[in-house]
Image: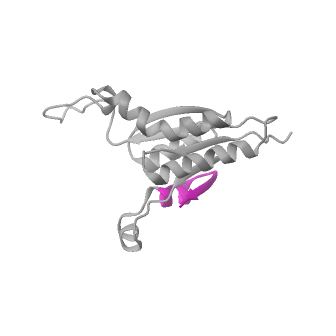
Amino acid sequence: MLNLSKKILVAIDGSPQSDKAAEEAVRLALASGTRFRSKIYAILVLPGTRAPSFTDFMPSPPPTERPGWEEQRKRIFYVVEKVAAEAGVSVENVVVYGDAAEEILAFAEQEDISVIVIGSSGAGRVRRALLGSVSTKVALHARCSVYIVR
């Protein structure tokens, strides 16, 4: 049987590009109609690891355990939560640590994601050629469709 409901992963970082990606993810979810409910996973990848390593001289708590995190989290996920609520689409927020492209790809694989929606980096050609971008790495290595929003 054909399954028209989709699992949509949208990469969020609080930037204007990720806000546009969040809006597009909700539009994709709505395209499946009311009969086939799609679900959105909004993923925020923070640098580093959740636990300090033994090489840290003065280990600091991860960002999710620092004062003011809840306010920052609300600001970062505001657009996706607002747009999804207005459209009646369910959204699950996920915060992980590590390399952004690797974590997005791993989560997509683990949850059997149908499509990844990600904002373009906005980096120039030279910078992107030297350093690469998260959206480029995800597009090249994902096992599902990738929608890059400009």
Q: Which residues are the magenta region?
A: 135-150
* Foreground of the two, 41 or 99: 41
The x and y percentages for residue 106 are: 51, 42
Q: Is residue 87 visible?
A: yes
* Foreground of the two, 94 or 85: 85
Give the colouring mode of the picture: one colour
Taking the spot 68% from the left edge, 33% from the top edge, the residue there is 88
The x and y percentages for residue 109 are: 58, 42
Q: Which quadrant of the structure image shows residue 33?
A: top right
Taking the spot 56% from the left edge, 36% from the top edge, the residue there is 82
The x and y percentages for residue 62 are: 29, 31
User: Relative to residue 26, is residue 58 drawn left or right?
Assistant: left
Give the farthest residue toward the left: 57
Quarter of the image with the N terminus is top right
* Foreground of the two, 65 or 71: 71
Taking the spot 41% from the left edge, 63% from the top edge, the residue there is 132
Give the farthest residue toward the bottom: 126
Count of numbered badges drawn on the protein: 0
Q: Is residue 114 visible?
A: no
Give the farthest residue toward the front: 86
The x and y percentages for residue 32 are: 76, 43
Q: Is residue 144 magenta?
A: yes
Q: Is residue 111 magenta?
A: no
Taking the spot 41% from the left edge, 37% from the top edge, the residue there is 75
Judge whether 74 appears above or below 11 on screen.
above
Judge whether 131 appears above or below 72 on screen.
below
Q: Which quadrant of the structure image shows residue 68?
A: top left
